[in-house]
Amino acid sequence: MSRKLAFTAVCLVAVGSAGCGTGESFPELHPLSGTVTRDGKLIAGGGLIFLPEPHNGSGLVVNASVGPDGTFTATTSRTTTKGADIRPGVPAGTYKAVYHPPGDGQKTGLEVEAAARLTVGPGGSAATVTLPVERPVGRGEDRDDDPASPRFDPKRKD
């Protein structure tokens, strides 16, 4: 599984409670880019999921891949009747940023939430996402929504 595909899978799982919108239109989108740091050093790789606060159930997924130089540029996607529609930028609002390290998307529990919230408005934003110095303990857990996982429960309803 490619990293980009794995990242998309993790993002969809993380925001599954938002639902899948079938509308064809997007709200106005604004640029959001920046860097990811921990303890004053750039973080290479992984991804960010931006969760709106308050949660709005829009069906939009806002995320970004973190490059080897620690930079990111956010995109917004929506599942439509024609498939995924991915566009640069994010809707205006306040977001919680959740970082997940590079991986194949088969593990959960390694995500960390940045303490500061990001606010995006007209004209866009440049941001530094600062991760806590303390990292999650352990190696993560198998996803429970993967039929190949021993934790999979087909009767589970989220």
Image (cartoon, rainbow, N blue to C red):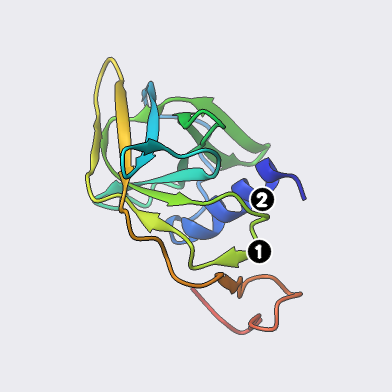
- Left or right of 40 on screen, residue 47: right
How many residues crowd mark 2 within 10 Å: few (<14), some (14–19), many (20+)? some
Say if residue 54 shows up in the picture. Answer: yes
- SS under mark 1: loop
- Left or right of 40 on screen, residue 119: left
Quarter where residue 108 is shown: bottom right
The residue sitting at 24% across, 24% down in the picture is 121
Q: Note whether 154 is above or below 66 in the view shown.
A: below
Q: Could you tell me how far apart the alpha carbons at marks 2 and 1 are, in whole angstroms?
A: 8 Å
Q: Note whether 38 is above or below 138 in the view shown.
A: above
Q: Amino acid at mark 2?
A: Ala
| Residue 6: mark | 2
- SS under mark 2: helix
The residue sitting at 39% across, 30% down in the picture is 35
Spot occupied by residue 153 in the image (x, y as percentages of width and height): 63, 83
Residue tagged 1:
106
Q: Amino acid at mark 1?
A: Gln
Quarter where residue 139 is shown: bottom right
